[in-house]
Image (cartoon, grey):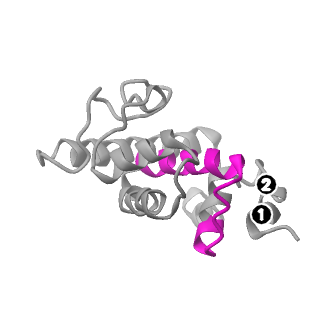
Amino acid sequence: MANLFDRLYQTIDYEQGITPWDVVETAISYNCMPWYDPRFIKGFYELLFACFQNTAYWIKGQYYARLVIEEMPEGIDQDLFAVATALAAGRLPNVESWNAGNPCASSWPATTVQYCSPWNGKMLRWALETKANKRLARRLKLKTSGYHSPRREMYLK
């Protein structure tokens, strides 16, 4: 009988936006963690990366990192353990794929990052500015598309 993770993995639909790290997150929420499955380990990497790429999910990322440290049996994946240990300590892992200066991997502007300390407000200002830019880009895209909501049609007549 297939476990929950295997059943979820068969339902991956990239058009709907269901990706392997979503599957891993759902499996973890139902307490199904098949550490022996390489797809689960790869998805866990992606889950940690997705959590720490988005400012709003850092606390969730810390939780998942601690899960790796506490729950993963020894000898499964030392790289994942090293990444989780670094993230739980509040610093970037010393792994090439986690290079925050790589614009393809992360939108964070600095090359070296301390996630939580020292607090100088730079991270907060960057997060607010990025969200504002994304919101503006969405509005401009909608405006150039020529779409008018039915509610606002009365103002255009």
Give the Cα distance between marks 2 and 1.
Answer: 7 Å
Which residue is outermost to the right? Answer: 1
| Residue found 39% across the figure and 41% down from its top | 133
Name the residue beneath numbered marker 1.
Answer: 8
Can you give x and y, in whole percent of width and height, for residue 89 in the image?
A: 28, 50
Horizontal placement of 33 versus 127: left or right? right
Range of the magenta residues? Answer: 26-53
Q: What is the number of the mark on residue 12?
A: 2
Q: What is the quadrant of the C terminus in the image?
A: bottom right
Front residue of 138 and 26: 26
Q: Residues within 10 Å of mark 2 (few under 14, many from 20)?
A: some
Question: Residue 32 magenta-drawn?
Answer: yes
> Is there a contact, CB below 8 Å, between mark 2 and mark 1?
yes
* Few, some or many residues within 10 Å of mark 1 (<14, 14–19, 20+): some
> Label 2 is placed on what type of residue?
Ile
Q: Is residue 153 above or below residue 95?
A: below
